[in-house]
Amino acid sequence: MSELAKGGSFLLQHTDTTRVFTPEDFDDEHRLVAESMTSFLEENVFPRMDEIDAKKEGLMKELLVEAGEYGFLGSDIPEKYDGTDTDEVCSTIIAEKVGAAGSFAIAHGGHTGIGNLPIVYFGNEEQKSTYLPSIVTAEKIAAYALTEPGSGSDALSAKTRAVLSEDGGHYILNGSKTFISNAGMGDIFIVYAKVDGDKFSAFIVDGDSEGLTTGAEEHKMGLKGSSTRSVFFDNVKVPAKNLLFKVGKGHVVAFNILNIGRHKVAANAVGAAKYALDQSVAYANERKQFNSPISNFGLIKEKIAEMAIRIYAAESTVYRTAGLLNDMMHSLDRTGDDAGAVTAKGIEEYSLECSLEKVFASEVEAFVVDEGVQIHGGYGFIAEYPIERLYRDARIRRIFEGTNEINRTIIPTTLLRRSQKGALPLFEEVGKILKKSNGQLTVRETPSDIVQACKEVFLFVLGHSQEKFGSDLMKHQEILGRLADIAIYSYAMESSWLRACKAEASKGRNVQLKTNMAKAFIHSGIVKVTNTAMEILAHVAAGSALEELQSHLVKLTQYTPMDLIAVREKVAGAISAAGKYVV
């Protein structure tokens, strides 16, 4: 196996197409999982969406049991504990496919992702043997209890306490959690509490424990069929053997599980966005105005094209990250007593990419469902049409698994901290770019050149932001957020283009369509990146100093425009002809 790429290194170096995983690289197992999951949802879940959202008694548990029978609950669980032990790509495929299933997706993800992965990655042998087999079959439903009424993004300020009993046999938990998915049917709760009020720790808590109660179901904007409740702990006795990982190391469990959770949320968002586009294209092909399908109208074509283009970019980004995570997991030796620490270090390496894709994919989904409603016109506002549910259900993905604002701050701060530790030569590259910006203007001719320009812009504005604010830069969230946006677009643009290049090299299908979508995304992306960079520069300089920085930015971002209107028309034509998202 070739050396693993360092997290965040895509900003500092060229990435070869051979180092990027794409959906076109699916093997027979991946394709079988995708086909099986699609069939399961079409036969068992989509026909019952109204019943699910009405919270029909016992239905969600029934569907999870059926999913378990098909093997869709144990993809991350070793065969030793009755799981299917497939790779990270299979888990990503399952997460993507289920994303369109609204409330079922939340129940499924809460159970198979953040609900079971703390045990899979950080549990000891006894904990895994006790709990994982019943999770695989949905005999017992898992839930993840981190958020509290006063601590959402600031998880470490949790007030739930755990005190070891005098005989050392139990921890006594007191406190509450809020917005807990699957709480109404939860049998296994991963609970975070502070031992003695200061040592943030993780516990496996049985749902039938005396003193554990749940509140009423929350009435939500979307995802109406998923169970969301508060959970209360009143002197709940948790066996000391149910401490997960180590006392005071709950943050290691929580944050790394959230990293994987962000990856799966991104995959969910791609699946939902694809489904929304499919619904919208089918409607546009069928709906006639002025004796013509509305899919023939220019402004509708542009919507369809841009929806497909952004989905393509998000899909490329998600599977690139899946490949990184998959290679990393396969490189680890998780057989020793330090398996939890080894796993945590591996996952943390790509925390930045997980945040990037979560922000990008969830915002692509938001764009797609909004445009989908617009294409449907008045019918998009009517509950009879799936796009109405998709629109409501999408909103939460920009909030949970860390709000997009929090994830935006994570991206540059992670890069800066790694640079300070010598893990990434960030400021060496910044110095090179600052010197380059003083040189001659170079026109960027190819998509690859434009992607490189965006990376250089990130380093350029980071360097000047650091000069302005020094160590206080991490306190300026407005700058951090804009730096994150440039990094996000750089990653998504490069992922799109490398995928297209890889398809062309292998003479794959729809190469021209992939190329058109990648080019369109890149050429519209450079405009966003340039404008974002200009906002940062206008904040760090003024007068003649700003004018000089502007001239340097122009040197870095000069490119030859392409006819985006014509390219989008071609993309729309291909999608409308297929009647769905195709690549």
Image (cartoon, grey):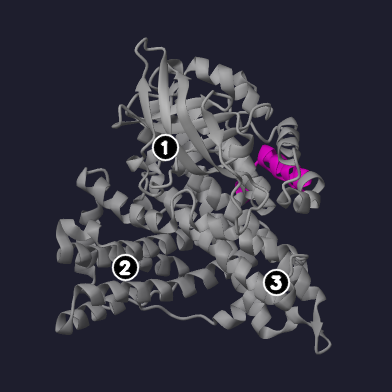
* Residue sitting nearer the eye, 270 or 453: 270
Asked if the residue at tag 1 contacts the one at tag 2, i.e. Cβ–Cβ closer than 8 Å, the answer is: no
Categorize mark 1 by other alpha carbons within 10 Å: few (<14), some (14-19), many (20+).
many
Q: Which residue is mark 2?
A: 457
Asked if one can make out residue 571 in the rendered structure from this viewpoint, the answer is: no
Q: Quadrant of residue 372?
A: bottom right
Q: Amino acid at mark 2?
A: Val
Q: Amino acid at mark 1?
A: Ala
* Residue sitting nearer the eye, 362 or 39: 362
Asked if one can make out residue 424 in the rendered structure from this viewpoint, the answer is: yes
Q: Is residue 569 magenta?
A: no
Q: Which numbered disc covers residue 254?
A: 1
Q: Which residue is mark 3?
A: 381
Q: Earlier in the sequence, mark 2 or mark 3?
A: 3
* Residue sitting nearer the eye, 407 or 193: 193
- Secondary structure of residue under mark 2: helix
The Cα atoms of the two marked residues, 3 and 1, are separated by: 38 Å
Q: Amino acid at mark 3?
A: Phe
Residue drawn 35% across and 72% down? 532
Asked if the residue at tag 1 contacts the one at tag 3, i.e. Cβ–Cβ closer than 8 Å, the answer is: no
